[in-house]
Image (cartoon, grey):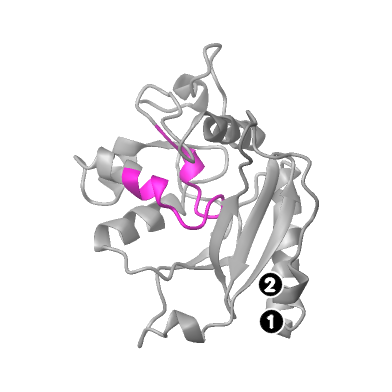
Amino acid sequence: MNHRSTSTPAEYSDGPTGRREDPADRDYRTQRFPTPFGDIDVTINDHAIVAAHYIMHPGTTDPDVTGPDVTDSAATSDMSEAQRRLFTQIGEELDEYFSGTGKAFTLPLDVEDDSTEFTKSVREEMAQISPGDVLTYGELAEAAGRPRAARAVGSVCRTNPIQLFIPCHRVVATGGSLGGYMGGARGLVLKQQLLDREGVPFTANGKVDFQELGRRQ
């Protein structure tokens, strides 16, 4: 199966072009969105998503599934009209994604950290994995131009600043085991839930079924 998205992919940018703006001068806003598998905090600047993180509550076995739709009114009361439109678009695309349509996100993304060229390549390739498909860490390393760097790909996934929208959950270990996600067992529950919602098939022992996907390991 071709791992490239058949929908228009998210508009991905690893850092602003031209002169790097001082982060202190940027106008950031964060809004919390409920999902079937827990709340996700999404931070934007004036034109794109810059961070997204699932909220994992201590002492539970799963991501929080009961949290309210929280918006920090102090942080969002004076947001720009462009930011309001972007938050509306984020909510609409999250609703569509979790309804099981299989459509890829088309939201603008702006990773503002000072990434290495390898990290940029991994993120760009990762952003192109279609909903319902996966790549192994080794396959992603090869796609990024460093076929022996599977371990380094795992590090890039662990430090992904825009969870869900840069879909590190679609990267799994050779043989179909999930690998890691968000640093623990609760994260792996979420990873399997997301892949299952996207239609990724699993074997009886909880591994990705590559044969069913029509792919070779």
In the figure, is residue 39 to the left or right of 24? Answer: right
Image spot of residue 54 (x, y percent): 60, 48
How far apart are the two marked residues, 1 and 2, measured between alpha carbons? 6 Å
- Seen in the picture, residue 24 relative to 112 is either above or below; the reply is below
In the figure, is residue 215 to the left or right of 90? Answer: left
In the figure, is residue 165 to the left or right of 141? Answer: right
Q: Which residues are magenta?
A: 155-172
In the figure, is residue 151 to the left or right of 127? Answer: left
Q: Residue at x 38, y 81 (%)?
A: 17
Mark drawn on residue 94: none
Image spot of residue 37 (x, y percent): 69, 39
Image spot of residue 162 (x, y percent): 51, 57
Mark drawn on residue 86: 2
Mark drawn on residue 82: 1
Look at the numbered discs 1 and 2 and tell me whether their residues touch, using CB distance below 8 Å. yes
Which quadrant of the rendered structure holds the C terminus? top left
- The residue sitting at the front extreme is 59
Q: Residue at x 62, y 61 (%)?
A: 42
How crowded pointer 2 is (Cα within 10 Å; few <14, some 14-19, many 20+) is rated as many
